[in-house]
Amino acid sequence: MNDLNQTTDVLTITLPNKDEIHLPSPTTLLEIAQRIGPGLAKSAIAGRVNDRLADLSDPITSDASVQIITAKDPNALEIIRHSCAHLVGHAVKQLYPDAEMVIGPVIEDGFYYDIAYDRPFTPNDLQAIEERMRKLIAQDYQVIKKMTPRDDVIRLFSERNERYKLRLIDDMPDETSLGLYFHQEYVDMCRGPHVPNTRFLKHFQLTKLSGAYWRGDASNEQLQRIYGTAWADKEALNAYIKRIEEAEKRDHRRLGRQLGLFHFQEEAPGSVFWHPHGWTLLQILINYMRRRQKNSGYVEVNTPDLMDRSLWETSGHWQNYRDHMFTTQTEDERHLALKPMNCPGSVLLYKHGLKSYRDLPIRMGEFGKVHRYEPSGSLHGLLRVRHFTQDDAHIYCTPEQMNEECRRVVELVLDIYKEFGFDNIHLKLSTRPENRMGSDAVWDRLEEALVTSLESMSLSYTFNPGEGAFYGPKLEFVLRDAIGRDWQCGTLQVDMNLPERFGLEYVDEQGERQRPVMLHRALFGSLERFIGILIEHHAGKLPAWLAPVQAVVMSITEAQSDYANAVTDILSGAGLRAIADIRNEKISYKIREQTLQRIPYLLIVGAREAENAQVTLRHRDGEDLGTFSVEEVVKRLNTECAAPDRETQERQQAARLAAITHLTASTC
């Protein structure tokens, strides 16, 4: 195949099906599409030339493998969305000529454009911009690309007073020519590719406004950001809108208020005020994980929240994570930091006393409070906070034990997620970042350990190059929720760098001192964030074993108040989380209100139930389950509200008792 820069008179173009066509040089993707057929030429959006995305108008001057991209192609969505961002610019400049355009990248499910303007945009402005975009699309105009000499581009944007575009050009000193895209009188700068005509942009919607900062730095000038979404067809757009509407109904912040779980206040930005029911939910998670870890051979520990700067310098966090840490200086000029991670504290626990190979593996679990400075604009309910609880664990093992420990962690994580209702889990292996500690040989060994563990379990995974922690590669567990959204939660990191930096040791079988391997493991990640995900996944209808209140006993009239309280006491005594509702309200009102509280079981007691020591049982979904004796209801709810690991606990307890019986018999 000829070099791309070598011009020939006739080009050989190889299509995806390996057919070849011959065209004069130079040619374009559009001419190739026209040669294949007029239908393809009309539906063509862009193309690939030797696996490189290109505009339909880009010249091809040498033999090449070519693929034409239409709206049905997976690559088309990003091109459509990027082109829609340019269309936002066209509409904004027509409506607000003094606005300065900044950047308009593609994001997940859509795009945004950052704009500098002398007043805040309003929802009415957003509507006007969208309407203008639709009028421009209806004009069915051609989008023209021109590769333009650098000096000419600078001159053009100077004349148009586009200061931010000039700053972007300054960031590309080696570019001698730049791609300009002409939307009629509007001009934007981009690498492309973009759609050739506005008719491909019909299926879009602007979604919201927000603030932003130039280059994402809060010390820079503030900009305005217009968000939008775009899709290849109307059906996909409608499905997305429906999904967003469903997500709004499930928003954990709204449900958190409605269910009385938590709230936030300006006096403590990024920190949660837990109400009794929310705190109960947090403790349910902790106690569940505490049991699972104990059954898996972990010991629970706790380390200080505030530690000296020197510790964080040794760990590397000070050099790599300083901007996210809360620090203070004491009167004796010591620098202290609130811990953003639990790892260094765990390391100091390990160092307290010499360890033997017989002690390993050591599995330390900690429900540690950590503090991280997140920019105020990124805070988002429970999903992004500054003060949160991690279900951290650190495993110290020999190199020979490393693969098995990785496998055990993965098995535990996947099993626990299923018990919370997550069956669709995707694994991502994040490999060495550019800014990292340790040699390539060490990283090779650590990455190989994770790969070997996954492959030994026949688990599929994808690579996430360059996204590992600065001290080791990372396995990420991504959960897909009930409406198709992905959430990155648990992590497993393999680390030989922190043991080296802190001088961790154990004594091997020959009496020699060796370095242990350190595994960093979190299943929920942030418990606060996981609760937010759980609330949205279940739309507030948490499984009965997780619900802060599992049953509410409601009296029909005031005459049954004492009986309702007595039933509630019986349920509570049996280990159920139950409350009484004996307010002087109609029973229909109580049922409706407690159903909105997503309480799994509603127990109704009237004169007949009180006389016969019974209750009428309803499910929160509206199903009337019948009338039962109090004893029958207690037995039923104890079964249906039991934590999913109770069966495992009972089996393990039975096995332990059997072992004790066997040991006693054999020694007597």
Image (cartoon, rainbow, N blue to C red):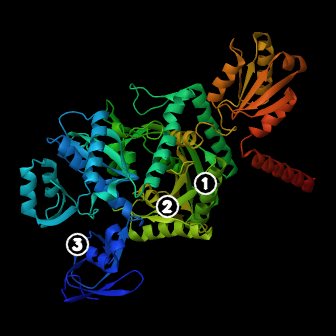
Residue type of the residue flagged with mark 2: Lys
Mark before the other along the chain sequence, 3 or 1: 3
Residue type of the residue flagged with mark 1: Val
Quadrant assignment, res 621: top right
Residue 413 shows which numbered tag? Answer: 1
Between 239 and 415, the residue placed more toward the observer is: 239
The answer, for residue 291, to whether it is visible in the render is yes
The answer, for residue 174, to whether it is visible in the render is no
Q: Residue 10's x, y, as percent?
A: 22, 89
Using residue 493 as the reference point, say whether residue 405 is left or right of it.
right
Marks counted in the figure total 3
Residue type of the residue flagged with mark 3: Asp
Mark 3 to mark 1: distance in Å?
49 Å
Q: Which residue is mark 3?
A: 58
Quadrant assignment, res 206: top left
Mark 3 to mark 2: distance in Å?
36 Å
Q: Is residue 28 above or below residue 561?
A: below
> Label 1 near label 3: C-beta < 8 Å?
no
The residue drawn where x is 33% and y is 61% is 79
Q: Is residue 568 above or below residue 210?
A: above
Q: Which residue is mark 2?
A: 428
Label 2 environment density (alpha carbons within 10 Å; few <14, some 14–19, many ≥20): many
